[in-house]
Image (tube, rainbow, N blue to C red):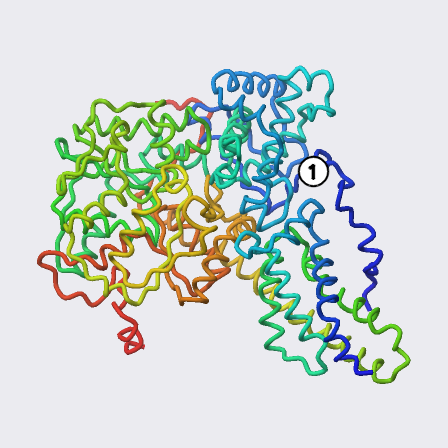
Amino acid sequence: MNPEKHLKDKQQKLVEKWVDAVFYTYPADSVKFFKNTKDSFANPAGNTIKRSIGLLYAQVIRTKMDPKAVAEAMDPIVRLRAVQEFTPADALSFILQIKQFIKKELGENRQDENVEAYLRVIELNVDKLILIAFDIYTKCREKIYLLRINQAKESVKKLLIKKDLLCEIPDYNPEPQSI
Amino acid sequence: MVDILKPEEMFKSIDYTIPEDRWEDVPPDLSEGNFCYPTKKKNLEYLGLPAKDEWSPADEDWKLPDNWEEIIHEGFKERLEKYRSLKVFMDICVRCGACADKCHFFIGGGDPKNMPVLRAELLRSVYRKDFTTAGKILGSIAGARKITPLVIKEWFSYFYQCSECRRCSIYCPYGIDTAEITMMGRELLSLLGLNINWILEPVANCFRTGNHLGIQPHAFKDMIDFFCDDIEEITGVKINPSFNRKGAEILFITPSGDYFADPGTYTMMGYLMLFEHIGLDYTLSTYASEGGNFGLFTSSDVMKRLNGKMYAEAKRLGVKWILGGECGHMWRVINQYMDTMNGPADFLEVPVSPLTGTRFENAASTKMVHIAEFTSDLIKHNKLKLDPSRNDKFKVTFHDSCNPARGMGLLDEPRYVIKNVCNHFYDMPVNTIREQTFCCGSGAGLNTEEIMDLRMRGGLPRANAVRHVHDRYGVNMLACICAIDRAALPPLMDYWVPDVGVTGIHELVANALVMDGEIERTTDLRFEPLNEEEEQTDE
């Protein structure tokens, strides 16, 4: 069998499974909204996840993955999860889940040498995916820290205070001052 | 291969119907990065508010006052008696869920307690226990719960994850204003000394010095003079605005962000240029040097005190009416609360534009006109000479700032102004603008750096819509009419749509404004070349 073609044919089903697995990482009460609200402006997070996963699936099943396309597909979903309430591992763990889905899909044909060799490629592809995601995630976090620093830096308040242009509320002093 | 649950195992454990933990049992995440820093004691003491020793929301024991339960109960009771609306809001919700998926914090983060209905339930459940017969007798069966220190923590966490933008309220079939529920929640917390510094420090500064940042009168004047020097360099026109001038026709008040922080400063320059051009008889005040009112985010009493300053100054100076700058929540205070707090301002006159004769009936009681209304009226009457091609390098979209949009219905005037001073304007999708506009994610005092993650995910729906017009039309400039927006949107754009800048609309007006006696302009107000070709040549 041609496993790549087979997975291409099964794209819709497997993407749906993968998307569901990502949604499952959110609180149960929110899953329905993320999953079912189709309007991409009313539900940007859910639709970002669906779009990214669809594009990532199309790449990960290829024997020759395009790293640039992977990075482009990966950026929106990682950028999103980097500012949601996840640990770094939880933010990226969804990537590993595709291995299980693909293995199960091709499970019956694993004796086929083609399939076995193809699965080794998939393993490598997923490894690449996670490394690309790691880079993006780190850049996003660096960006967040930079934004925090910039906000503090751009506020030149301290400088103005030094120059006697600003006057803050004086520190509270409970001791009565002698005059 | 990493050892993870098999998909089948994973899906089996998904419970779409009833969550394993009841929402009451899920504790709030109060780890570092998930809360705003509490206020310094000195700020509370300065304002005469209940003060509390230094503490952190990450502390296990918040060391609440011994009688904290009584304080909350009495405070709640007092507010239910004072505000009929609060009692109605507590009783009338049928949990239809229309608001549930309308909050930008829920949409961007997925935390169910950021569904407005559930955020309100945090307060409502305690209301039922303390103030309804069914709740007192039936307890949790009637949706009631006893207040505990953990509930207080939950309130602090979630009432400071609401930007009081009121998007949810426009979808409520009963008209429940969930922002006011947050306001009540914050008021009750304030009774225990639980406030955040990013709100209370500006409030204390405003009360003492006249503005959020503690800018003293001489520094305020220096800053304005500095802008006038820049304006002269760019246009050749020298401007000498007056300060605290008695007998001026109009008092102009704008948020301090407009003269303190970029890109608001360019908007401030825009006001000054416009007023000079039309020969407006106005004055600036070093006392009422703040349009913003962080009292709105603290309590009605504090809001009233800060709002009162503007009118006291208008009275002292003997002006006829007040013109207000591009501020957000100032307008909610003016339009929805001012009249019953400090109004009606009968000592002022119903605003009439001295140039067009237009009588602003909508401001007949508050006597305060929004500058977008004022300027659009000028344009409508051909009072401004404009060259929109000076803004040709900008492809502009407009973010309806929540409070002017939903708090006063200011939807068309800013667009009218922009379309007259720019040649390229593109609106964002309909369900993200006008009444349905998405918050910047940092309103109501949440524009502080320690919760940058929350701000980024809360701002996602807005940024997503900007990305759409950026990708489709090449939009590179996001206009807004709120000083908090001008501070909050640049980092939001930097994270989600890095090629889009942020501006106030009067910066665009001033770029296009052909002033009497001006020299040929080569740069915009940011000292950047007027068009892209020059920019590229320079490079």
Q: Nearer the viewer, residue B304 or A116?
A: A116
Relative image position of residue B9 (x, y in whole percent): 84, 56
- Residue reaching furthest bottom? A113
In the picture, measured across the screen, residue B338 lies left or right of residue A111, that is left
Q: Is residue B183 above or below residue A95?
A: above
In the picture, measured across the screen, residue A136 lies left or right of residue B280, that is right
Q: Is residue B74 visible?
A: yes
- Residue reaching furthest right? A111
Judging from the image, mark 1 belongs to the subunit labelled: B
Q: Is residue A162 visible?
A: no
Q: Quadrant for residue A81, please give it.
A: bottom right
Q: Nearer the viewer, residue B200 or A66?
A: A66
Q: Residue at x 72, y 82 (%)?
A: A63
Q: Residue at x 60, y 49 (%)?
A: B109
The tally of labels here is: 1
Relative image position of residue B417 (x, y in whole percent): 27, 52
Label 1 sits on what residue type? Pro
Relative image position of residue B58 (x, y in whole percent): 63, 39
On-image quarter of the N terminus of chain B: bottom right
In the picture, measured across the screen, residue B501 lies left or right of residue B147, that is left
Relative image position of residue A135 (x, y in whole percent): 62, 69
On-image quarter of the C terminus of chain B: bottom left
In the picture, measured across the screen, residue A148 lies left or right of residue B72, that is left
Q: Residue at x 75, y 75 (%)?
A: A7
Q: Quadrant for residue B91, please give it.
A: top right
Q: Which residue is mark 1?
A: B27
Classify mark 1: residues with Cα within 10 Å, few (<14), some (14-19) or many (20+): few
